């Protein structure tokens, strides 16, 4: 039965520590910015590599060949 009292005391004190930490960071303004994380995914931050016109990748070559075929069929 003594272990139950010890466990209850430990859990209540741990909950109190988490509550105090939450209140301190809430007052500092940690949780005020609600909109930025939701909108951040909409912006594309990837840096695209610039390729020289003479050096085409495989995807660009395939697109170019497909365009030639479409031009001939029209």
Image (cartoon, rainbow, N blue to C red):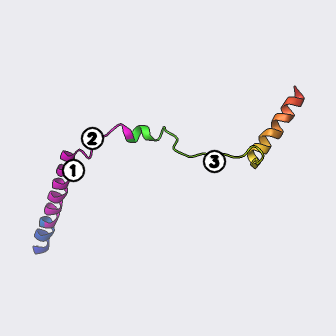
Q: Position of residue 45 (x, y in %)?
A: 51, 44
- Decide which of tag 1 and tag 3 comes sooner along the chain: 1
- In depth, the one of 2 and 66 nearer the eye is 66
Residue that label 3 marks: 49
- Give above or below for 26 relative to 8: above
- Give above or below for 41 relative to 17: above
Q: Residues within 10 Å of mark 3 (few under 14, many from 20)?
A: few
Q: CA distance from mark 1 to mark 3?
A: 41 Å
Residue 12 is drawn in which quadrant? bottom left
Residue 50 is drawn in which quadrant? top right
- Decide which of tag 2 and tag 3 comes sooner along the chain: 2
Is disc 3 placed on a helix, strand or loop? loop
Q: CA distance from mark 2 to mark 3?
A: 36 Å
Q: Is residue 15 magenta?
A: yes
* Residue at the spot 15% in from the left edge and 67% down from the top edge: 10
* Residue at the spot 15% in from the left edge and 54% down from the top edge: 20
Q: Residues within 10 Å of mark 2 (few under 14, many from 20)?
A: few
Q: CA distance from mark 2 to mark 1?
A: 10 Å
Tell me, for residue 32, which label it has, or none.
2
Q: Position of residue 21 (x, y in %)?
A: 19, 55
Q: Residues within 10 Å of mark 1 (few under 14, many from 20)?
A: few
- The magenta stretch spans which residues? 10-36
In the picture as drawn, the residue positioned furthest to the bottom comes out as 2
Residue that label 1 marks: 25
- Give above or below for 56 relative to 12: above
Q: Answer yes or no: do the residues labelled 1 and 3 have beta carbons within 8 Å?
A: no
Q: Is residue 27 left or right of residue 32?
A: left
- Decide which of tag 2 and tag 1 comes sooner along the chain: 1
């Amino acid at each position: 039965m003594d272990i139950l009292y010890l466990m209850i005391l430990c859990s209540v004190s741990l909950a109190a520590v988490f509550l105090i930490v939450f209140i301190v960071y809430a007052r500092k303004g940690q949780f005020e910015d609600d909109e930025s994380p939701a909108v951040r995914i909409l912006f594309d931050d990837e840096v695209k590599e610039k390729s020289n016109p003479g050096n085409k990748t495989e995807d660009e070559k395939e697109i170019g060949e497909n365009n030639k075929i479409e031009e001939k069929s029209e």
